């Protein structure tokens, strides 16, 4: 298995525990949660069950019974309630002589249908029976991250503080994607891996579709634009599988999808028509928990004045190139290599990749051990730029320096000319003037191949290259 070293070690530690353990594994759809649990525990799993999407309670119970029958309880009767279901699960457990009984219930949110009583019976199973033993490892999993967090981890009822281990599964980093691609017989350059990442993010399920015999453009066409492309319908499937009523969530990401820096709550309310109340707060929290958006503070603003930004690579790609694309060009990506829309998207997408690798940027700057706060900055009042100015990554350091990061995607060394030098100097001066900071401010370039040394490049105090983003 590529990556997941910490998660594998933690799961093995849990298995070796002397107590019963209740483990919640959660993360974005397609990120590899089920694969991780199955690979780590393999033939040590006594009982495994996956909830059914869009199925009523009766169908969920029938599927649970089938799982019990397939895994050793051939005489399991028809199940009329979740109380009966967990009684039969106890019977299966008691029939086993394994030293540790691993129970894996996947897609838990799908099982908890309205008025089914599932969650209360799960509570009873754990609190009144399993937790009193020493040999149970209960692993629950779900792609609806917000459900796992709110219904299990933050449960105010019988499951309050009952989870003994939380394992949030993050998307792969660039370095992990490189290792994964190599393990599948591919030999992409790092520039190609960055471009794949711009589209696919660090979602292993998407990367598994890549064909080592195709070029990058051919692979993207095959995944999204060809007849029968496996990810053509992924957008609708992604959001409908995570949210019972996906329309409000899609409306929010649609509004954010066309704003580079993001939107504040008031702006988002105007764009979507949602009132600034608890419902909007809940929608934003769930999207953030599922990894689609990020909430950050703009430099110099109060914490409550947060900015929300769409950060999911695939969703950004969908809005830019797939939404409304009914042209039927099966070679769309190959034919758009030098289009203005694609070149503009590359710059924005590379910025998102950099924002997903701030840890690597800090390491490259030699400040991994320095306390920092990451934000952005924007102003409408810079006279030299009628549209205002913005810096997408500001690293405010406890050692009294601020890195003003400019992120540029290019096919070679990035060339700073006279106009670019003036723009960078004006932006730095505007930041100092309008924020009133007394810290030193360094212009930092994050580029694919570094900056070309010339008489204008001295405006840059530090730089980070693409290769440094691949660090573990």
Image (cartoon, helix red, strand yellow):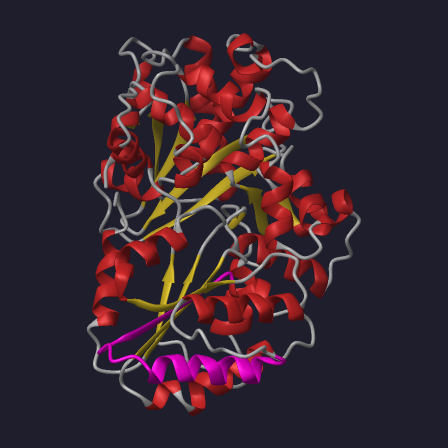
**Which quadrant, please, contains the C terminus?**
top left
Viewer-nearest residue: 283 or 147:
147
- 315 relative to 40, above or below: above
Stretch in magenta: 80-107
The spot of residue 189 in percent (x, y) is 29, 19
Viewer-nearest residue: 352 or 35:
35
Instruction: Confirm whether the magenta stretch covers residue 241.
Output: no
- 194 relative to 132, above or below: above
Asked whether the viewer can see residue 305, the reply is no
Furthest-front residue in view?
75
Q: Quadrant of residue 315?
A: top right
The spot of residue 39 in percent (x, y) is 29, 54
Asked whether the viewer can see residue 369, the reply is yes
The spot of residue 182 in percent (x, y) is 25, 29
- 341 relative to 231, above or below: above
The spot of residue 203 in percent (x, y) is 42, 40
**Which quadrant, please, contains the N terminus?**
top left
Q: Is residue 232 left or right of residue 428?
A: right
Q: Quadrant of residue 446?
A: top left
Viewer-nearest residue: 14 or 165:
14
- 140 relative to 323, above or below: below
Q: Is residue 371 left or right of residue 264?
A: left
Q: Is residue 3 left or right of residue 376?
A: left
């Amino acid at each position: 298995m590529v990556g997941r070293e910490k998660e594998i070690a933690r799961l093995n530690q849990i298995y070796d525990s002397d107590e019963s353990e209740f483990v919640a594994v959660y993360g974005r759809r397609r990120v590899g949660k089920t694969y991780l649990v199955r690979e780590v525990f393999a033939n040590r799993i006594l009982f495994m069950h996956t909830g059914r999407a869009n199925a009523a309670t009766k169908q969920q119970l029938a599927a649970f019974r089938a799982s019990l029958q397939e895994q050793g309880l051939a005489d399991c009767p028809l199940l009329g309630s979740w109380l009966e279901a967990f009684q039969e699960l106890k019977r299966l457990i008691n029939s086993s002589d394994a030293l540790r009984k691993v129970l894996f219930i996947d897609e838990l949110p799908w099982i908890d249908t309205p008025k089914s009583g599932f969650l209360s019976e799960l509570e009873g199973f754990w609190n009144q029976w399993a937790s009193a033993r020493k040999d149970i490892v209960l692993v629950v999993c779900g792609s609806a991250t917000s459900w796992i967090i709110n219904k299990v981890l933050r449960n105010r009822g019988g499951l309050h503080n009952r989870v003994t281990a939380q394992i949030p599964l993050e998307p792969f980093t660039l370095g992990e994607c490189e290792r994964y691609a190599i393990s599948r017989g591919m030999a992409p350059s790092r520039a190609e891996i960055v471009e794949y990442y711009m589209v696919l993010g660090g979602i292993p399920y998407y990367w598994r579709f890549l064909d080592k015999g195709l070029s990058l453009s051919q692979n993207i066409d095959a995944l999204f634009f060809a007849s029968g492309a496996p990810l053509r319908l992924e957008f609708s499937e992604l959001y409908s599988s995570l949210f019972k009523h996906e329309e409000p969530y899609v409306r929010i990401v649609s509004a954010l999808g066309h704003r580079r820096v993001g939107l504040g709550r008031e702006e988002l309310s105007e764009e979507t028509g949602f009132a600034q109340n608890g419902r909007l707060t809940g929608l934003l929290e769930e999207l953030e928990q599922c990894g689609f958006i990020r909430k950050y503070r703009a430099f110099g603003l109060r914490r409550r004045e947060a900015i929300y930004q769409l950060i999911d690579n695939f969703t950004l790609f969908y809005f830019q190139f797939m939404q409304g694309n009914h042209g039927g060009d099966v070679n769309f990506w190959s034919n758009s290599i030098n289009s203005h829309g694609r070149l503009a998207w590359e710059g924005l997408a590379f910025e998102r990749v950099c924002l997903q690798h701030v840890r690597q940027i800090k390491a490259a700057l030699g400040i991994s051990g320095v306390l920092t706060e990451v934000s952005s900055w924007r102003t409408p009042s810079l006279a030299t730029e009628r549209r205002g100015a913005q810096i997408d990554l500001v690293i405010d350091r406890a050692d009294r320096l601020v890195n003003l990061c400019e992120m540029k995607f290019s096919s070679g060394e990035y060339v700073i000319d006279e106009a670019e030098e003036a723009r960078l100097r004006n932006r730095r001066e505007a930041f100092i003037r309008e924020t009133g900071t007394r810290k030193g401010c360094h212009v930092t370039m994050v580029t694919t191949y570094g900056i070309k040394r010339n008489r204008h490049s001295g405006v840059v105090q530090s730089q980070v290259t693409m290769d440094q983003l691949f660090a573990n």
